[in-house]
Structures are given as structure tokens and as C-alpha cells.
Amino acid sequence: MLYYTLIFLLIALLAGALGLFGIAGIAMTIARVLFVIFLIVFIVSLLQRGKR
């Protein structure tokens, strides 16, 4: 999931550099949502591992 976050972040940076700000905004939003989901899953897995 972190892989997809980095891909969308790269798309956002490239689109922003080319002046495609609508696409850059959408890609940045997707990257942000995926990163938050990744963090939640990561923290839950750490908590589950700590209980064992």
C-alpha cells in the first residue's frame, strides 16, 4: 500500500510540475488517503504483535 502512495505522490509532483493542477490535486488526495490507511493498518498490526 505504501508503494501506491509513493506512485500517486510522484504522479502529483509530475502533474504539478507540468501545470496540470487538477490532476495533481486529485493524485495528492489519493496519496494522502492511502498513506493514512497504511498508517492505521501498520499501527494495528504493531498492537496485535505486542499482545502475543
Image (spheres, grey):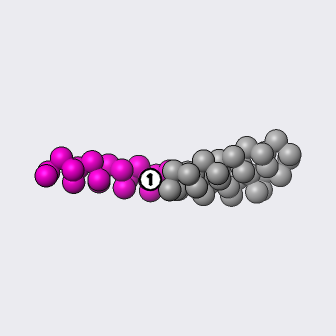
Mark 1: few/some/many CA within 10 Å (<14, 14-19, 20+): some
Q: Residue at x 65, y 47 (%)?
A: 9
Q: Amino acid at mark 1?
A: Phe
Q: Indicate the position of residue 34 as horizontal and vertical percent values.
A: 52, 56
Residue at the image point whose x is 29% and y is 54% from the top: 44
Q: Position of residue 45 (x, y in %)?
A: 29, 53
Q: Is residue 47 within the magenta segment?
A: yes
* Residue 36 in the image, given as x and y percentages of width and height: 46, 52
Q: Reply yes or no: does residue 45 show up in magenta.
A: yes
Please state if 27 lies on the left or on the right of 5 as rendered.
right
- Counting every numbered tag in the picture gives 1
Query: In the rendered image, which residue does mark 1 sit on?
Result: 38
Residue located farthest toward the left when viewing the structure as drawn: 52
Which residue appears farthest toward the right when viewing the image? 18
Q: Which residues are magenta?
A: 35-52
**Residue at point 32% right, 49% down?**
43
User: Which SS class for mark 1?
Assistant: helix
Q: Main secondary structure of the magenta part?
A: helix
**Residue 35 shown left or right of residue 6 in the figure:** left
